[in-house]
Image: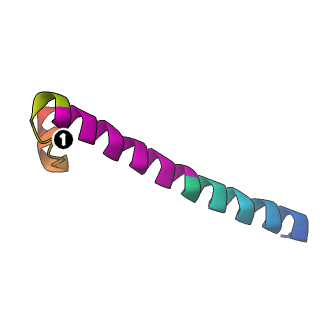
Amino acid sequence: MKTSSKTVVSGTNLVVVLKHLQRISEHCTNVAEYFFFRINAKIIKHDKFEDIEKG
């Protein structure tokens, strides 16, 4: 299988952009949780196992 350097560079750039988008989404989640806490005075707990069991 032949790989051109352009494809490798494009793929690397895509990975970097996706990582940045992941960080942005994590920050958005943190901001939303902060405002939820400020308004409702409740802490949101993220327990993945409970979410899976609930369906």
Is 32 placed above or below 11 here? above
Residue located at (64% from left, 62% from top): 16
Q: Amino acid at mark 1?
A: Ile
Q: Position of residue 47 (x, y in %)?
A: 15, 49
The quadrant the C terminus occupies is top left
Q: Which is nearer the eye, 50 or 16?
A: 16
Q: Which is nearer the eye, 22 or 11?
A: 22
Q: Position of residue 23 (x, y in %)?
A: 48, 55
51 falls in the magenta region: no
Is 53 placed above or below 19 here? above
Residue located at (32% from left, 46% from top): 30
Q: Which range of residues does the magenta coloring cover? A: 21-38
- The residue that label 1 is drawn on is 52
Is 9 placed above or below 25 here? below
| Magenta highlight: main SS | helix
- Can you see residue 4? no
Regarding mark 1 in the picture, which secondary structure is present there?
Answer: helix
Q: Position of residue 32 (x, y in %)?
A: 32, 36
Relative to residue 11, is residue 21 drawn left or right? Answer: left
Please identify the residue farthest to the front as the structure is shown: 38
Residue located at (65% from left, 55% from top): 17
Relative to residue 18, is residue 52 drawn left or right? Answer: left
Classify mark 1: residues with Cα within 10 Å, few (<14), some (14-19) or many (20+): few
Relative to residue 49, is residue 17 drawn left or right? Answer: right
Residue located at (89% from left, 64% from top): 6
Relative to residue 7, is residue 32 drawn left or right? Answer: left
